Structures are given as C-alpha cells and as structure tokens.
C-alpha cells in the first residue's frame, strides 16, 4: 500500500471518528437525534416498560414489532432510547382479546404499562355439580369451598359445600328453630363452621354443627363489615366502633360529626381494608376514615369498593366509574392522595356491584336488571383508550373470590366458576 493511500485512509477514518464519536457519546448519555418539522433536534430519550399477564405476547409500538423479553428471570420488557412523543402501544396474543394504549414518553422518564391483563377470547368455565340449587344470589363465600346462596323469592338462605353435591342446608329453618330472625349473614373469617349475622339483638355468631348462638355485640348497628379479625360497625349512625373476634373486646374508633353525616341520614354500607374504612349514607355521601379522620369524598355516590392494596376506592356516580386515591399512586400514571380519576367510558346501566380484582389494577362491574345481569372487566388506567371487556351476559349473580382469584356466577339455577388466565 502506497504512502498516499495510507494517508487517505488515515484522514478518512479520523474524519469518521470526529463525526461518529460525539454522536456515540451523546447516544450513550441518553440523547438522540430526531427529525422534527424538517429540522434535526437533539433530545433526551425516554423509555416504555411493559409487563403483561400472560407472558409471551406480541408487542407493537406505532406498528413496529418489539420482542417480548419477559420470562422466568425478567418480569417485563423495557424499550429504551426512544424519542419523547406519544406512541400507540398494542399488545396481542393468539386466543386473547387485543389491548392497546396511547402512551406519552417524556425525556429521561419511563412510561409504564404494567399489570396489563389480556382476556381470553373464550372463558373456560366449570359447573359445580349441585343436584338442586334452591337460590341464585351468591351472598358469601367462605373457607373450604362453602357458599351462602339466597333465594330472592322466598328470602331463604342456603349453605352449600362445593365438594358435596347434596348440600343445601336451609339456614333460615335452623335459625327459626332457635327463634332467630336475621339479616346480613356472612361466614366467620377463620372458623368455617360458623356464621355471623345481624338480629334485633345485635351481632351474633351461629355455630352450624352445634346449633348454638353466641351474641358478640349487644347493640343493633346501622351497618357493619368484617375484616380479619375484626367487626367494624356503626352505632346510632354516629359512632364508628370495632369488635375483635380474637380478644372479644369492643372499642370506639371515632365519631362521625354532623358535617360528615347529617342527623337525617343513615349509614347504609361500611367496608374496611384493614387500614382505611369507607361508608356510604342514605344521602349518597361517600365517607372515608383514614387515621381516624372522617372525610366526605363524594356526594352522589351509588356504590363503592375498597381496593385490596388499601390505596384506592372505586365508586359509581350516575353510572360512571371513578377512582379515589387514598395514598399517592405512581403506577402507570400519577395521582396524589385525595385526587379522583374519572374513567371516561360509556355509562353502565343499573350498576349492581363493583368488585376489585386482587391485583388492585382492575375492576369487575356487575350491571343490568335482577334477572338479566352482565359483568365487564375494566382497567383503572385512565390513559386512553381505557380497556374494558365484557365477560358475562344473562346471569343472575356474580361473586369474586379474591383470595383464590376465582370468579363465580349463577345462571339457570346452576353455579359456574372460572379463572382469567
């Protein structure tokens, strides 16, 4: 090779280094060259992080396919060094309904799409082989696969065992023999052979095998609920109290002042997450008590449900679903404690119930008339579009077992169950 040729090559590679070197350094520090409005701009890059259930999905960003890197070691897929702008993220998988979201990527930040749940095109359900179902409203589900099912026509409650097709214990008949008229019956939280219910005498426990009754709260509450191992209840629509099923002690938590619950209103429902307590009154005021401080957070609420992670309350207002944040929320989108997110979808007609999925990122919405209900599955991510899927139609009642992640429903005097997988 001649001296001249060597000099030409030297200056060529030197010039190439001068051009490419700074670009490589800029890129390594998270900067990128982007063509915007016909001009070249240097911008800090961002990223998108995707985490799905199930795994092995197809990911596309603005139509470009991205490899799903999730697996046993890595939970999700990180798409980094992308220009700050809005992207259309699409997630698909054969046999599942499509999911999509418009994500705004900002410089030096990661736009998240975590806890994305894909819904199967066809739900795989199983039928529980009860010989005769005497009611269709699933009231409660307890330990060892037991159910309380209510007959709306006769108002009788029946105790069923999932593992015994002949089971159909008439709870009313047993309690009538003990001269007890009751309402609001549930399972004891850690004794599967006991039921807890309300009578004119207060809150009582029914030992089913022994046909014995124990009174634990000798006052009639306005409303009550159970959260292991406590019974939270409202007395005289003003006192929030707690009774421990372990220590058998009763104590006052706080009072509801007139400004929070007016004298002409009744508490209709109360629910506890273990940390926060929420309740709704006959004026449709939704009240939350966190650290013993009552706060009114909505005035036209119809139904509500506390999330399993104790950070959120879902409630309905004129057929719309809203999320109130008890604590700061930074997953997928940001909300400060005390703020409310409106999930702007079409209004549901006659919402009957709201239940949280156990991941605290999704809701089951039960709606329709008493003889023909539907259930939709909906994310709480308010970024558009909000992914909502119809799961069931033409059913009589729906119940979600969050502990085992199982959904139950009744139809034509039969009980079915399924799991979203």
Image: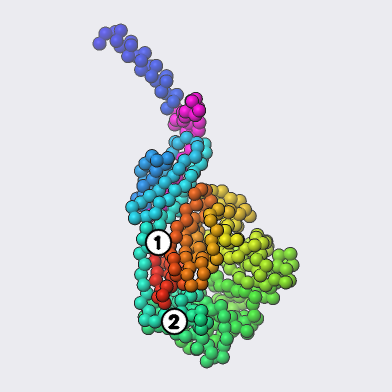
In the image, 9 versus 358, the foreground residue is 358
Measure how far apart labels 2 and 1 are at the Cα level. 28 Å
Q: Which of marks 1 and 2 precedes in the sequence?
A: 2
Residue 65 visible in the displayed image: yes
Q: Quadrant of the N terminus?
A: top left
Q: Which mark is residue 330?
A: none
Residue at 61% of width from left, 54% of height from top?
340
Q: Which mark is residue 420?
A: 1
Q: Quadrant of the C terminus?
A: bottom left
- Find residue 115 and report its horizontal and vertical position in percent: 45, 53
In the image, 259 versus 75, the foreground residue is 259
| Image quadrant where residue 214 sits | bottom right
- Find residue 59 and report its horizontal and vertical position in percent: 38, 45
- Find residue 372 and report its horizontal and vertical position in percent: 47, 70
- Find residue 173 and report its horizontal and vertical position in percent: 50, 88
Residues at circles 2 and 1 in contact by the CB criterion of under 8 Å? no
> In the picture shown, does residue 119 fall above or below 63?
below
> In the picture shown, does residue 414 fall above or below 300?
below
Q: Which residues are magenta?
A: 25-54
Asked if residue 45 is among those painted magenta in the image, a careful observer would answer yes
Residue at 47% of width from left, 85% of height from top?
170
> What type of secondary structure mainly makes up the magenta span?
strand
Residue at 55% of width from left, 54% of height from top?
343
Residue 404 visible in the displayed image: no
Q: Which residue is mark 2?
A: 134
Residue at 54% of width from left, 82% of height from top?
205
Binning the other alpha carbons within 10 Å of mark 2 as few (below 14), some (14 to 19) or many (20 upward) gives many
Binning the other alpha carbons within 10 Å of mark 1 as few (below 14), some (14 to 19) or many (20 upward) gives some
Secondary structure at badge 2 equals loop
Asked if residue 146 is among those painted magenta in the image, a careful observer would answer no
């Amino acid at each position: 090779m001649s001296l001249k040729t060597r000099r030409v090559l030297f200056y060529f590679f030197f010039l190439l280094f001068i051009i490419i070197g700074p670009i490589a350094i800029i890129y390594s520090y998270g900067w990128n060259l982007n063509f915007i409005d016909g001009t070249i701009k240097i911008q800090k890059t961002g990223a998108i992080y995707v985490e799905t259930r199930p795994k092995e999905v197809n990911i596309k960003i603005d139509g470009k396919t991205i490899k799903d890197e999730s697996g046993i070691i890595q939970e999700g897929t990180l798409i980094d060094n992308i220009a700050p702008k809005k992207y259309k993220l699409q997630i698909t998988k054969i046999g599942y309904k499509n999911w999509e979201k418009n994500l705004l990527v900002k410089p030096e930040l990661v736009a998240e799409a975590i806890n994305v749940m894909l819904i199967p095109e066809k739900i795989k359900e199983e039928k529980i082989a009860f010989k005769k179902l005497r009611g269709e409203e699933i009231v409660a589900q307890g330990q060892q696969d037991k159910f309380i099912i209510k007959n709306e026509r006769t108002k009788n409650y029946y105790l069923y065992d999932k593992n015994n097709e002949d089971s159909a214990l008439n709870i009313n008949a047993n309690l009538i023999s003990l001269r007890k008229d009751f309402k609001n019956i549930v399972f004891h939280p850690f004794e599967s052979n006991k039921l807890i219910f309300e009578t004119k005498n207060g809150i009582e426990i029914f030992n089913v095998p022994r046909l014995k009754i124990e009174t634990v709260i000798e006052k009639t509450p306005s409303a009550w609920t159970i959260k292991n191992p406590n019974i939270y209840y409202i007395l005289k629509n003003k006192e929030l109290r707690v009774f421990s099923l372990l220590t058998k002690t009763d104590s006052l938590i706080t009072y509801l002042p007139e400004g929070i619950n007016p004298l002409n209103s009744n508490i209709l429902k109360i629910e506890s997450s273990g940390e926060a307590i929420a309740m709704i009154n006959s004026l449709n005021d939704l009240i939350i008590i966190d650290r013993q401080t009552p706060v009114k957070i909505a005035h036209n609420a119809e139904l509500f449900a506390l999330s399993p992670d104790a950070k959120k309350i879902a409630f309905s207002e004129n057929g719309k679903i809203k999320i109130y944040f008890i604590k700061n929320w930074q997953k997928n989108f940001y909300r400060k404690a005390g703020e409310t997110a409106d999930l702007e979808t079409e209004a549901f007609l006659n919402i009957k119930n709201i239940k949280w999925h156990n991941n605290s990122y999704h809701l089951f919405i039960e709606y329709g008339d008493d003889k023909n209900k539907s259930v939709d599955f909906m994310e709480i991510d308010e970024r558009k579009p909000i992914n909502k899927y119809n799961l069931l139609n033409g059913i009589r009642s729906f119940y979600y077992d969050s502990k085992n992640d199982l959904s139950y429903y009744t139809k034509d005097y039969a009980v079915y169950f399924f799991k979203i997988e």
